[in-house]
Amino acid sequence: MSVKPAQKPVELLGGLKQPEGVLESLDDAITRKRNGEPTWNLFERRTKTHNEAIGLPVGKVLPHPLAHQAINERFARKTSGNQRMIYIHIPFCSTICSFCAFFRQAVGSYDISCYVDALVNQINRLGAAQSCPEENIGAVYFGGGTPSLLHQDQIEAILNAVRSNFSLSRDCEITLESRLNGITSEYLQGLRRAGVNRISFGVQTLNTEMRRTLGRIAERNHILSVLHESEHAGFESITVDLIYNLPGQTAKTWEEDLNDLASTPVTGASVYSLIPFKHSVLGKNLAEGKEPPLGGIQNEYEFYSTSDRFFTNLDGWKRFSPVHYGKVGCERNLYNTMRSAPIDILGFGAGGGGRVQGLLYMNPVNVSRFVEDQAQQGDQHLFAVDMDPLYPKAMSCFELTDSLSMHESAIPDFLPSVSTTLSKFQEMDAARCQDGVWELSEAGCFWGYNVSAAIAQAIRQDMNTISSQEVNYE
Ligand code: SF4
């Protein structure tokens, strides 16, 4: 089929930055590599977040009345039969972590039961509108905020609404992000009874003193005991988030964290470099000299290499992405790995976003507004973008950084700059292509978000040049 892309210039998804200059820095990085510079010196700047890396032209923003009609119409549209995923946002936290820049509200600022009712209402209303309720949902993800602030009965009520409106695959991965403070074995068992089979804890570090710096309350022994209780409760996968390059962190404390975790039933780990957001409490404390200064890029690389070696050498474990590791057979990390696939992700809840049948959308980030809209049986404040039909094809190029390998056929013909870009990463030993399959090397994983940012810039460049000409979309 031959289609015309939406008229250019296209709107950009609100809030996402577009890092420019990454493509321009590739030749310089190749020269540095040839001159024998170490891996950490290949680029001037390390891109550290998925959102910062991917600012793509996605389509046209719809004004509110049209957005509202469009979401109902897209849920009702006949689909292609692909697997789908569900994202549920719980935007509350009991305490605010010092490094956090996510959308969340302190608990107590809103009646959580009203929010749960509104969420169930939205799931029921949009679920009732869909035309293919028999289609498989492969993954459900409760993110936040802190979803574990909800009582297990509230999680069960939400999952019951999901099940009565959507058909979950038999091996559906159901993940819930959880705090550690105040988590009991009864709570964990309640989550399992509700159907949650994968739990993700924001550990960051087991070092109690450093956790205090981050605004985290739970102590090391409590964390270890929650991880063991999770195994007793029967979770198929228990995964943790870790952060390196924290103020005061040393090679020794980092190794202690890793060794401690290896003695627990943890089956997955996401490992991130600290991002000292300027407006976060931690960012301000660092700027005012109230915390020890952070180590530079060489320090980051050393922390990264230590954990990368550690997890890839753990018995039965492998890298799932540049930032995620897990035990084969227990961990699948489906929700994160499949984000770049051309499938629908149905997002529910204030600040929750998704895409359905070519419509990219985000519910209002304001909890009161979301609840009021649901009380009126509508999504009057939905932010929605009618996606350029080329966008899902372009997204498939991020399979490389979402899942470490990608067949070259995933790169559409209308994006020649993506292949040129990957060849440049190959020249600096950050990527390789064998038998038509692209893979990231260890250096490519360290610079993983730079690779994403370069791919995004290459896509923008090509999509701006194809403008109004006809392209082969199949
Ligand atoms: S628990 Fe997560 S969302 Fe909440 S403040 Fe901490 S980092 Fe932010």
Image (spheres, rainbow, N blue to C red):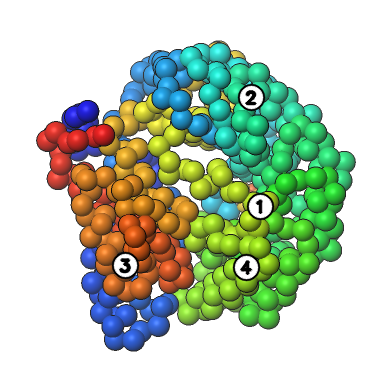
* Mark 2 crowdedness (10 Å alpha carbons): few <14, some 14-19, many ≥20: some
The residue under label 2 is which amino acid type? Answer: Val
Q: Which residue is the extreme one toward the right? A: 186
Confirm if mark 1 falls within 8 A of ligand 1: no
Q: Nearer the viewer, residue 145 or 175?
A: 175
Q: Is residue 23 above or below residue 30?
A: above
Residue under numbered circle 3: 425
The residue under label 1 is which amino acid type? Answer: Gly
Q: CA distance from mark 4 to mark 3?
A: 24 Å
Mark 4 falls on what kind of element?
A: helix
Question: Residue 307: x and y, percent?
Answer: 60, 71
One can see residue 447 in this view: no
Question: Residue 338: x and y, percent?
Answer: 49, 43
Answer whether labels 1 and 4 touch (C-beta < 8 Å): no
* Figure quadrant of residue 34: bottom left
Q: CA distance from mark 3 to mark 2?
A: 42 Å
Instruction: Name the N-terminal-most of marks 3 and 1.
Output: 1
Q: CA distance from mark 2 to mark 1?
A: 26 Å
The residue under label 3 is which amino acid type? Answer: Phe
Answer whether labels 4 and 2 touch (C-beta < 8 Å): no
Residue under numbered circle 1: 329
Q: Nearer the viewer, residue 181 or 338?
A: 338
Q: Which mark is residue 162?
A: 2
Q: CA distance from mark 3 to mark 1?
A: 31 Å
Q: Look at 39% across and 50% down and name the residue there.
A: 398
Q: Which residue is the extreme one toward the bottom? A: 36
